[in-house]
Image (cartoon, rainbow, N blue to C red):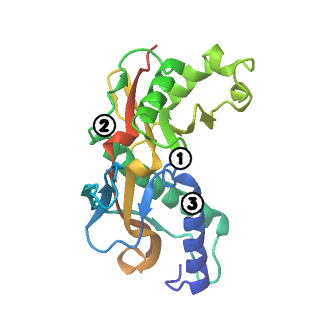
Amino acid sequence: MSKFLSAVASKQFDSDVKQAYQTVGLLRMCTTRRTGVIGDTYNFRKIGKGLANQKSTSDEVTPMDVEHELIPCTLTNWNAPEYTDIFDQKDVNFDEKMELAKVIAGAIGRREDQLAIDAMEASTPTIPTVGGSGAMDIPKIAKAAAALTDQGVPMGDRYIAISAVALEQILNDPTITNQDYNTVRLLMAGTINSFMGFEWKIIESREEGGLAKNGPIRNCWAWHRDSLGVAVGMDMTTRVDWVPERTSWLCNGMLKAGAVVRDNDGLVKIEIDETV
């Protein structure tokens, strides 16, 4: 194998990885993202609520004294490297290249998801935890939705992350799947995209950790986009370098990012028993 690789092949590989990355990260569009961050820490700004006050004629105005709080987010470095000999001097095996691009993009995408999940796990939500026993069902979903509404959380841009078992429990609920009650034909699709004001994200079992589980109890999360922040110092990028000692190309995907809960009022943990 030659140590020479055309710039076209390397650029195309980078493009393939980035294209795949746009589709594999389930939660990347469900957060408030800040890109181009310099350094290892970014401070998200949280602005409190204001209260209008009555003003008498000719009186000076009374400031609302809105609170401003900085929420620090620590960025960490991640990479997904792999040695490969799929590149040669004259051309590139594009089928194999695409497979490697998907692998690297998937690893980085799942890691970014995990940063967001871990941030929610490390948070202290204002809303008490919903559940603790029983399957994922309508009462739990409704209670989470109502709790967010009571905190003044906007109705749009709400998301919920559940496990595959939670999805199975929902699909076994006749009230949800019966078309007399629900116009969303869940059983035909075998999944759920939106329901009760939430956009649903199914998080499978992942080596990165996925949704936390303690014994039979799985933690699912419902949140509003603005309550969860992701700071990105270096968005997903790739390098393809020749390593003489290995006589191979080192293909690497890299990410510098961090996540933090910006507003504890905007998320709620839903516990389910996966053995039910």
* Number of residues whose C-alpha sits closer than 10 Å to that of mark 1, classed few (under 14), some (14–19) or many (20 or more): some
Q: Is residue 49 left or right of residue 16?
A: left
Q: Which mark is residue 209?
A: none
Nearest the camera: 232 or 90?
Answer: 232
Position of residue 194 measured from the top left corner of the image (x, y, whole percent): 62, 36
Q: Which mark is residue 125?
A: 2
Contact between labelled residues 1 and 3, with CB atoms less than 8 Å apart: no
Helix, strand or loop at disc 1?
loop
Q: Earlier in the sequence, mark 1 or mark 2?
A: 2
Nearest the camera: 259 or 6?
Answer: 259
Q: Is residue 209 left or right of residue 205?
A: left
Helix, strand or loop at disc 3?
helix
At a point 30% along the width and 35% down the height, the residue shown is: 126
Helix, strand or loop at disc 2?
loop
Q: Cα distance, mark 1 to mark 2? A: 18 Å
Position of residue 154 measured from the top left corner of the image (x, y, whole percent): 49, 43
Q: Amino acid at mark 2?
A: Pro
Residue annotated with mark 1: 157
Which residue sits furthest front?
57
Q: Viewer-nearest of labels 3 and 1?
A: 1
Q: Cα distance, mark 3 to mark 1? A: 19 Å
Marks counted in the figure total 3
Q: Which mark is residue 22?
A: 3
Q: Earlier in the sequence, mark 3 or mark 1?
A: 3
